[in-house]
């Protein structure tokens, strides 16, 4: 089955000398990825950031690694250049570097591998699927990493690297990764937005968001043993119009009213389809 339909699980026990890396980007992802690579023994030759503050903060965490805020002063000695940059600036930043022909990878879930073809024949994607915040520690060993590369040598290099910091290493092509990223947006970004809406509702009562945490924790815990469809509860499952109508009328924001209506409809349709399939 192709990578578009299913990620291929990879295991590696590479023992050779680890390649040196230069990382462009000291934001949320870069901060955690650089630390994971550093603690796995990868030489951090240089860091790049737009700001001295971000570069200094990360450098201090990884043995005072050299850094620069000037793209023209990037080291030419690294074995691999990792771009942990925002999607919107990835191409722009690369176009300003002297890195053409170097081994370059990006870390974006929704950007194609082909974006790098303008700059190198040895390109790759190294996508850790997780939500990162600088101040929140993460265990990289449990974060799934998805790899794509332009050739076999680059693929091996990236699989080896991923295997040094994670127990879950997968091959997945650009189209598959885009679908994966979409799933992650639903699971993480959209869920978090629902928390934000819920927090607004609680503010009207003078209640802290923390009162919902036991409920949220239990909901998350259930899907470790049940499928999301099986774990779904609430009035939308049975499409209780009395409750749904009453709740929708309590929502003052028209857009949030529409969200409530559409999500309720989607929950009911998925629950009904699951019920039919079980018969």
Image: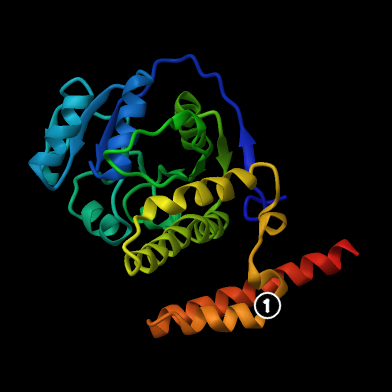
Q: Is residue 149 left or right of residue 56?
A: right
Mark 1 closeness class: few <14, some 14–19, many ≥20 residues within 10 Å: few
Q: Residue at x 15, y 33 (%)?
A: 57
Whole-percent x, y for residue 229 in the image: 69, 59
Q: Is residue 159 left or right of residue 26?
A: right
Q: Is residue 177 above or below residue 78?
A: below
Left or right: where does residue 221 sit relative to residue 48? right
Q: Position of residue 254 (x, y in %)?
A: 40, 85
Q: Can I make out residue 253 in this image?
A: yes
- Residue 20 vs 206, above or below: the answer is above
267 or 66, which is in the foreground? 267
Quadrant in the picture for the C terminus: bottom right
Residue 51 vs residue 254, the one in the foreground: 254
**Number of numbered discs on residues:** 1
Q: Which residue is mark 1?
A: 240
Residue at the spot 78% in from the left edge and 65% down from the top edge? 274
Picture residue at 17% right of the left edge, 29% below the top:
59
Q: Position of residue 167 (x, y in %)?
A: 55, 28
Secondary structure state at the residue bearing disc 1: loop
Q: How is the image coloured?
A: rainbow
User: Which picture quadrant has residue 189?
Assistant: bottom left
- Place residue 230 in its image quadrant: bottom right
Q: Is residue 38 above or below residue 88?
A: above
Q: Nearer the viewer, residue 91 or 185?
A: 185
């Amino acid at each position: 089955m192709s990578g578009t339909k299913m990620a291929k699980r990879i295991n590696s026990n590479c023992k050779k000398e680890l390649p040196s890396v230069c990382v462009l980007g000291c934001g949320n992802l870069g901060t955690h990825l650089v630390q994971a690579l550093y603690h796995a023994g990868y030489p951090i030759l240089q860091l790049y950031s737009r700001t001295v503050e971000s570069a200094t903060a990360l450098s201090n965490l990884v043995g005072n690694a050299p850094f620069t805020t000037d793209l023209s002063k990037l080291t030419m000695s690294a074995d691999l250049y990792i771009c942990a940059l925002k999607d919107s600036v990835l191409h722009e930043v690369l176009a300003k570097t002297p890195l053409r022909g170097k081994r370059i990878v990006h870390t974006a879930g929704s950007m194609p591998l082909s974006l790098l073809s303008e700059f190198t024949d040895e390109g790759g994607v190294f996508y850790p699927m997780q939500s990162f915040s600088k101040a929140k520690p993460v265990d990289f060993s449990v974060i799934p990493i998805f790899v794509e590369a332009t050739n076999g040598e680059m693929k091996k290099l990236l699989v080896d690297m991923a295997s040094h910091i994670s127990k879950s290493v997968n091959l997945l092509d650009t189209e598959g990764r885009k679908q994966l990223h979409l799933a992650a947006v639903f699971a993480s970004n959209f869920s978090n937005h629902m928390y934000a809406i819920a927090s607004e509702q609680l503010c009207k009562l003078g209640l802290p968001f923390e009162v919902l945490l036991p409920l949220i924790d239990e909901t998350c815990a259930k899907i470790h043993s049940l499928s999301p469809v099986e774990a779904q509860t609430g009035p939308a499952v049975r499409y209780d119009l009395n409750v749904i109508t009453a709740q929708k009328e309590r929502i003052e924001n028209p857009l949030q009213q529409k969200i409530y209506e559409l999500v309720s409809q989607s929950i009911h349709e998925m629950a009904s389809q699951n019920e039919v399939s079980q018969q």
